[in-house]
Amino acid sequence: MPVHVVKDGNDLDAKVPPHLQRVALPNIKLSSDCIHRSVKGKVVHKGPVVSCRVRDYMLKAVIQEEDPQQSSTSQHASINVIIFGRLAKDFSHSVNQGDIVLLAGFTISNSPTEQTDRLHPCHLEIGGPNACVYVCSSAVSSSSGHSAITSELQYTYVPLNELKPRRVVNVYGVVTFFKQPFPTKGTDYCSTLKITDQSDAKVCCTIFSERLEDHPKIFKIGDIIRLHRVKSQMFNGSMTLVTSLGWSSVTFDGLINSPIEPRTSSQTFHFGETDRRTVETLRQWAASQSLQDSEPTVPLSSVQPKMYFDLTCQLLAKAYIDSRCILLKVWDGTKCGHPLLNVAVAPDALEGESTKIQDRENMTANILVFDNHVEVARTVKPGMFLRLYNLHAVPQIPPDQPSSVPFHLSFHLHGGTSYGRGLQSIPSHSPDLFNLKRVLESHAGKLACEEEVNDDTLIDVWYTPPEAADREDTKNSYTDRTCGHTLQQVSIAHLKRSTPPVVSHVCARVKSYEPQKLYQCLKLFCPRCETIKDVPDDESIAQVFLETLRCSNQPCSEHWAVTSSVDSPQLNRTITMHVSCDMVLDNSHSQLLFLQGVTLDEMCIISGSHKNVVPVWSEDGRMKLLDLSAPFLFCGDKRFYGCKQCTQCLFVEPEVSGVEVWDEQGVAKALGVQLMQYALLMKFELEDETSTVEAWLWEDAEKFFHVSYADISASQHLQDKVQTIMDTLQPPGSSMEERPWLELCLITYTAKENGRTQVCYQIKNTESKKNF
């Protein structure tokens, strides 16, 4: 599993075996063929080597598509790569951020982090015996996703103090001031900036372009910019630079030792070793002149009322207030020292996930974006990283509150461009985000690697494990986990910050549960269409039987059945029993009876002494099943129902041949009925010292209560047993401190309801102790 190092970009393609066919990253799908395929890209992030019990070592990297046409037209131009075993250590030793790599011998899997990192929906796994990596150092390759020309073309750069009017020039400079692009009265956008260099001259630059993406990508004061083909001219007695035909710009981070990654929208551009040295020299000079802000932005924890500041943050959600205002809900992982105002909007108006956790911890900044900044705000999506300039911290009294209530802080990005006011998105791999990501990841916390390499393991590579939420009370827990997972116990607050799907262990108390009337928790579930409905009460079922009696009281005659009748003393009614001729011959006729002309009470009496009784009625002399809102089968005290949606039954004759066991499933198969299953559905509100969460008990309810669904539907004793367990978990009239702790295994997953995706929690692999 070697890592091959090549000397230049041309060698990278030449050294690769000819049978490997290259695939563009945006074209990768879960169904793609990986055999004899390779991918090529720039390493935009390289994580640490992590110990993994299954494959010894693991490393996660992100590579970006090298083909400029592919990368500029697709949102999936970057993909996660998970490297295993010895290859992970070799990769860590030989590959640096910014290097170009070519990978072969990989497999493709779904990416569990797509919703959080907004990268490719798939990820690559590499580490088998056929895996190999070819790498070209960033010192001799392009350091961006564009086509850089590395040959030393003859570009002449003019020092800023030597500029002369009416010349088209190329310049380098350090940014000392900038404004975000704003629309002009024509078709262009305009942005302005001031730059300086070692000559100590300061020059204003005005950039005009119809496309926002063509403007220089400047993130902070101290960034370095290269301008080609700009025109110098005098304006108000000062030298200025204005864009001219064929102009271009490339910007770089100004921090010493940060990766030299060009930021540009140009499809091809020149970048050679001379340029690299120029950037490094300007970085050293800018640092010596203190031109770079040591803290270019202010965290929320340091914000004071009425101040103006720059903020780097992650967008959690947004909502449209009106045509001139958009609400952005953001956080930077720090707590503000003042209460933060929560701007209320309709739930269906909010784009993104709920911010309740951050709201509760005073970590959500509600930013109102006005006027000319709305256009940019419309383009940003939840999960993106943003930088806002000249943001105003506005103290306000919450609506409908008396003046004596302490003020809360809201944040306004006012219209206009004064003082560089504006906002822009920052690429997730930008060095400017390293500190922010570290704070967010530290706050969010994730579980350590599990024994198996699964989605949870891949998510957890980036996060350090939280402190265990162990407590002595768990030894007196009224439940046991049966999952066998070797997971660290976490708090509910941590659970709610985790990214689904994930399995977690928690210890909590029952704050409340629904429904309080336990007979209401018994449901009917169709495994085919996943319909859930309430179990009908006896009054509704009796009405179905009566309606059937009114519609038909003539016995039916079927060629496949042996029929016997008895007259009922009520209303000259005849009760008819049918059995299958084939079953009579097999001497198994007592296994399945068809009963016609009875009431519900009569059916219950007769079924008490027979194994399987099916209520039927007659239409035009032919036998029909009752409406499926009533049970189609009575087995002693048990009743079984069919799904109306999934049963395509025109009952003609039961298929009795081949049925070995005459239980509810065998009868349903013979009659062509989709059997509905009983289920217990309960909602628990769980609480620990950190938070509360609503969790469903459903799929493992039988295990939890040590009862079967079908048995509990017919047994008052078992229903009383469930009630006793619930009274132990939440004793009537008890306080939270008096309630027992429960050790629970919870799964976090997403589900769609009314077109919206929600995060849900379910109790799994947990049972109550049998010594209640």
Image (spheres, rainbow, N blue to C red):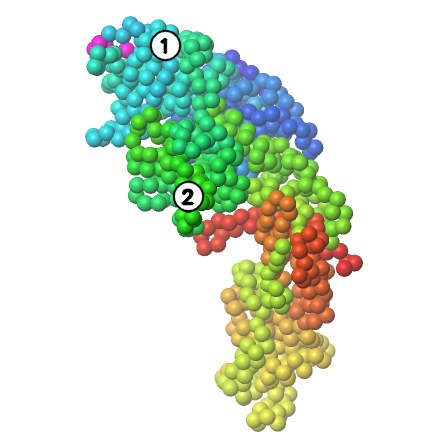
Q: Is residue 100 left or right of residue 452?
A: left
Provide residue 135's location: percent of width, then percent of height. Answer: 53, 19
Residue at the image position 56 percent from the left and 41 percent from the top? 497
Tell me if mark 1 has few (under 14), some (14-19) or many (20+) residues whose alpha carbon lies within 10 angstroms of its own. many
Q: Is residue 120 visible?
A: no
Residue 167 falls within the magenta-colored stretch: yes
How far across and how far down the image is residue 605, in percent? 67, 82
Query: Could you say which quadrant of the image residue 370 lies in?
Result: top left
N-terminal-most mark, 1 or 2: 1
Taking depth in this image into account, of 279 and 412 the one nearest to the observer is 412
Q: Can residue 206 be seen here?
A: yes
Query: x%, y% of residue 309?
Result: 41, 28
Place residue 147 in its image quadrant. Answer: top left
Q: Please provide percent x and percent y for residue 16.
A: 52, 21
Q: Which residues are magenta?
A: 165-169
> Circle 1 — which element?
loop
> Relative to 131, does residue 577 appear above or below in the rendering?
below
Of 618 and 188, the residue lying toward us: 188
Q: Secondary structure at mark 2?
A: loop
Q: Badge 1 is on which residue?
A: 197
Q: What's under tag 2, amino acid-wise?
A: Ile
Amino acid type at image mark 1 = Asp
Q: Which residue is mark 2?
A: 397
